[in-house]
Structure formats: C-alpha cells, structure tokens
Image: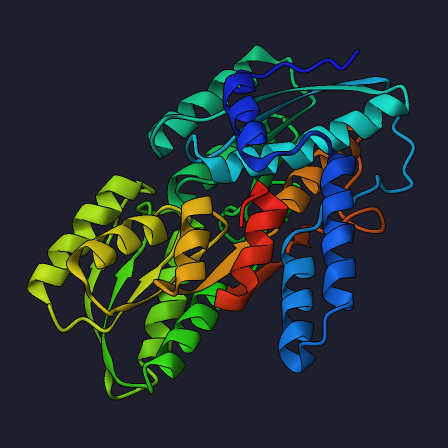
C-alpha cells in the first residue's frame, strides 16, 4: 500500500481531476499518442516546431536512476512558496517517483507544506520547526527570499541537517545547501519572453512588468532579464513594474490600474504563473490590444494563448522537477554529495510555446481543446 504523509491530498485530488490524470502511465500514453499524431501531420516547419515544443514542455515518462538506496524507508520535509497549482504539478512528479520506489520495496514518506501566501518569515518558521522535529532524512525548500532564507539553510547545515533546495528558486550563491533541483535559468527565461515581445512589437512601445513575490529569486531574476532586454532597445520603455504576490486577482487589479495610467500600453511581461491570467482578464475586459507574454501552464492562460490574447508562455517542466527532487533527496539522505550520481544543480527545462501549440497543450494537460 502506498504510504504518504502530507496535507495536500484534497488539493492534489482536485488537480488530478482537472488534469484528467488517472495515472502516470495514462499521461505517458496521452503524450505518446499526441506525438504520433504530430508525426503524421504534414505541417512543415511549423509542425516540427509544435512537436519539439510540446514534447520538451510536458514529459511524464520518467524512470528512477540506477541507484540502490541504502534503506527501505525515507522521510522528507518539503516546503515551498505558496499553495498554488504550479506546485501541485511538481507534487505529481514526486508521487510518480514515490510509486516507483515503492515498486522496489522502498517506502518514501514526506510532508509537502506551504502557506496560503508567500512569506519568508513563515517559511523560516516551517524550516526551523522541521529541524527541531528531527524526524526528517532531508529537508527541502523552494526559497521564498534568498536574503532571508539562505542564512537559515547555512545554520541548519552547520547543525548537521541535510538540506536541499528545489522547484523554481535556489538559495544565494555560496549557500551550504547540498543540491538544487529546478529552474537554473530564470533570468534567461525572462529575457527570452521579453525578446519575443520586443520582436512582436517591432522593438518599440511601452511595456509593464508584473513581477510576482517580493524577493522570490525566480520572479526577481525573470524581471531582471526582462529589464535588461528592454534596455537594449532605445524605442522600448518600461512604464510600470508591480508585484502581484502570485495572486491572479491582484494581477488583474494592477493591470487595470496600469491601463488606466497608460492607456497606450503596448505590452505586459508576466513573471509567474498567476499574473498572465490576471493580466489577460483585464486586457480582455478593457479591449486593449497590449501584447502579453508570461509563464507556465495554467489552463485559463492556455485558453488565452489559444485565443491570441496571450502571445507566448514559457512552460516549465514541473513534473520532472518533482520526480528528480525526490530521487535526489534519497541519494542525499544516504550521505551522497554532488558528483557522479547527481549534479549540484539539476537543470530542468523551460519551453516557450505559442498560439499554435495551445490546443495540444490543453489536450495533453487538461483533456481540453
């Protein structure tokens, strides 16, 4: 029987029903079937680009690395920025790895907890409480604010706690955490999305940036990539930079205010999964033709992409992040350090997808066209 110790069962069940995932094998079958459909189309270069994009962005086909764990039971603690569907998708990858370990006779239990809204102070309390409990082989964290959390991780490491980072945000350079699994190229993601926007606007116009959570490394890095890209083009101007705290509703309100202040706005750069949705709702409501670029695979965002309201989305491979986090946590628990078995930073992919990619993404992820 599968054994888990977490408090997000209801959220995951809701996500699973939304995504129409009955099992990992079913998702893999859907992916394979979609690939066969694409392989049989005659769309020339465009079709090849769709196939490459979709297969890079959604990869449910994983197998554990050929490593023999030293124990038959492991217990982990993972905490992340905030309760949100993005991290539920990461959790699905963890569950897949957990099932595969169980098939080998190894039980992996884990807590997977986060606050309702991003808070470095809350995350600090959770980390210290997990350390004090002393029940966990490894403690993992998706860093909410590198300036606040990195020293906490250093102290935990000095205390003998095996600490790793995962998901979208690593700790500060030089932090004593053992390894990181996730996106190592958030700055480049922000730059790539912004470059696509600039090209779409013929390298001229007024744009706004919706960042996300204050101090969150991934959001701040993407925003910096966006700002540096805009700075290359003398006819491009950033007229507003706002923090929506990973809230769709706040992103919506902020976009409405930006449109009121700048009715001639040409584009919006969105640095997390929530704000493309909020921005698109506001743009649609006001009838603006501002071009939106943003992050990830929210179902509503994919519909806006399909309808042309959103121009492109950078989709991270959340499933792989979760899967690799769990199997590397096992290796860390056994006393292994980065080297031959795993890298200090396991880099997961981000794929920029466009309007023509949206239908198959909706089908693969949500059973929705």
Q: Is residue 268 above or below residue 68?
A: below
* Quadrant of the image occupied by residue 201: bottom left
Q: Is residue 360 visible?
A: yes
Q: Pinpoint residue 154: horizontal percent, then vertical percent.
A: 53, 37
**Residue 27 at x, y = what percent?**
71, 40
Q: Residue at x 7, y 63 (%)?
A: 261
* Along the line of sight, the residue nearer the viewer: 238 or 40: 40
Residue drawn at (18%, 51%) of the image: 254
Question: Would residue 332 be visible to someone looking at this image?
Answer: no
As drawn, 6 above or below 285: above
In the drawing, does residue 336 fall left or right of residue 220?
right
Q: Give the camera-side residue of 151 and 320.
A: 320
Q: Is residue 107 left or right of residue 216?
A: right
Q: Is residue 342 above or below residue 351?
A: above
- Pick the front one: 36 or 107: 36
Q: Position of residue 75 (x, y in %)?
A: 70, 18
């Amino acid at each position: 029987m599968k054994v888990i110790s977490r408090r997000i069962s209801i959220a995951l069940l809701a996500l699973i029903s939304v995504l129409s995932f009955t099992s990992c094998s079913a998702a893999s079958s859907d992916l394979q079937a979609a690939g066969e459909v694409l392989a049989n189309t005659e769309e020339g270069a465009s079709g090849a680009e769709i196939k490459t994009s979709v297969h890079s962005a959604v990869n449910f086909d994983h197998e554990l690395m050929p490593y023999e764990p030293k124990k038959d039971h492991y217990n982990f603690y993972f905490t992340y920025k905030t309760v949100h569907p993005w991290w539920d998708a990461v959790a699905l990858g963890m569950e897949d790895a957990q099932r595969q370990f169980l098939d080998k006779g190894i039980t992996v239990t884990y807590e997977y907890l986060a606050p309702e809204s991003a808070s470095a102070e809350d995350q600090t309390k959770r980390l210290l409480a997990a350390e004090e409990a002393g029940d966990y082989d490894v403690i993992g964290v998706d860093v909410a604010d590198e300036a606040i959390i990195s020293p906490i991780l250093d102290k935990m490491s000095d205390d003998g706690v095996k600490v790793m980072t995962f998901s979208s945000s690593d700790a500060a350079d030089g932090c004593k955490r053992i390894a990181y699994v996730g996106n190592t190229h958030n700055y480049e993601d922000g730059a790539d999305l912004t470059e696509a926007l600039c090209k779409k606007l013929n390298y001229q116009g007024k744009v706004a940036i919706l960042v996300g959570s204050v101090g969150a490394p991934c959001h701040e890095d993407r925003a910096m990539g966006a700002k540096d890209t805009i700075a290359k083009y003398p006819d491009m101007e950033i007229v507003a930079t706002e923090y929506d705290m990973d809230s769709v509703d706040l992103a919506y309100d902020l976009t409405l205010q930006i449109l009121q202040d700048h009715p001639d706005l040409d584009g919006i750069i969105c640095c997390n999964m929530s704000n493309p949705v909020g921005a698109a709702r506001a743009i649609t409501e006001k009838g603006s033709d501002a071009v939106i670029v943003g992050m990830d695979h929210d179902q509503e965002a994919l519909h806006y992409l399909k309808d042309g309201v959103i121009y492109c989305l950078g989709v991270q491979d959340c499933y792989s992040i979760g899967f690799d986090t769990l199997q590397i946590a096992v290796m860390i628990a056994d006393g292994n350090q980065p080297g031959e078995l795993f890298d200090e930073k396991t880099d997961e992919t981000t794929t920029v997808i466009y309007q023509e990619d949206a239908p198959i993404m909706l089908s693969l992820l949500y059973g929705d066209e």
